[in-house]
Amino acid sequence: MNRRDYTAAVLKGLRHVTESEKERIREELDGHMEDHMLELMELGWEAEDAEEKAAACMGDPKEVSAALQKCYSYGWLIVNRVITALLILMVLISVSEFALMGRAVFQNQQARFDPMSQMGEDVRVRVKQELDIELSCGNSVVKFYALGENERGELEVHWCIRNKQAFRHVAGNIDIHYYHPQDAEREILGGGGYYSTSHIRYGNDHLELPEGTESILAVVSWLDQEQRIEIPITWEVGA
């Protein structure tokens, strides 16, 4: 059974599931099987055999479908329903993969809905403005979620990067730079830092702003593409 047949067999048994929810389940199942398939091919398996083995490792499609159907009968919010369904799938796959996949799902959803929860209290108290700005960069999403001010009077810009598919690794080729909105060639310099897991990258940039600066221009670049977004500042930094 190939990936397409396996996914179709799982989705066939689902009721009370919207088309968008089915599509998300389809993407998650296919993505995991593809990852497993590639690992097998690196070990010398032929593509067709690797695909069949990856599908077989997911478990009986009827059992997976039945487990998913139980989760979708309660009318929870989409994110909670998808996470729960995926956790059941993980148990059916293997104990070791359950731990890895569960951590990936949690980190992805945390970055998507509540990135400030990973902040230390010493950083959180410096936040002066919460943001919800997302930029799509290929298969990744860059989210600017907060602005703050450090003890040196510098602007702190907090952001995170996640893959659109929870199990996929975060892209390492995305760069962020800042400029004055009135002068796109005048880069704003500073310091900062970041930390990464295999699935999420968090960063905070410290920028030295001229007095009276009311906004900054963030430029997000990857490969040969870029996106620009002006971010307003609601207080006078360094006053």
Image (cartoon, rainbow, N blue to C red):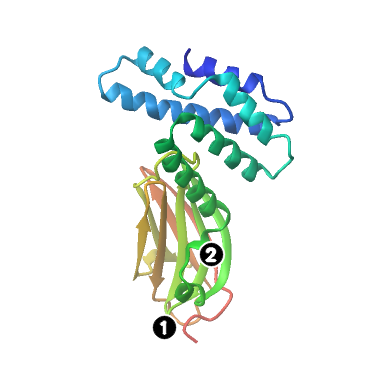
Residue at image position (46%, 60%) is: 159
The numbered disc on residue 231 is 2
Q: Position of residue 237 (x, y in %)?
A: 49, 80
Depth check, front residue: 125 or 89? 89
Helix, strand or loop for disc 2: strand
The residue sitting at 48% across, 43% down in the picture is: 102
Pick the front one: 219 or 29:
29
The residue under the point 36% across, 59% down is 195
Q: Earlier in the sequence, mark 1 or mark 2?
A: 1
Q: Which mark is residue 225?
A: none
- Quick one: label 2, few (<14), some, or many (20+) residues within 10 Å? some
Please rate how many residues cluster around mark 1, counting C-alpha atoms within 10 Å: few if below 14, some from 14 to 19, many from 20. Answer: few
Considering only vertical position in the picture, is 206 above or below 31?
below
Is residue 138 among the parts visible in the rendering?
no
Q: Is residue 108 left or right of residue 18?
A: left
Q: Which residue is mark 1?
A: 151
Nearer to us in this view, 140 or 1: 1
| Tag 1 and tag 2, C-beta contact below 8 Å | no
Q: Give the percent coordinates (x, y) of residue 99.
A: 43, 42
Q: Which of pointers 1 and 2 indicates the residue nearer the eye?
A: 1
* Residue type (three-letter) at the residue carrying disc 2: Ile
Q: Amino acid at mark 1?
A: Glu
> Residue drawn 56% across and 79% down?
235
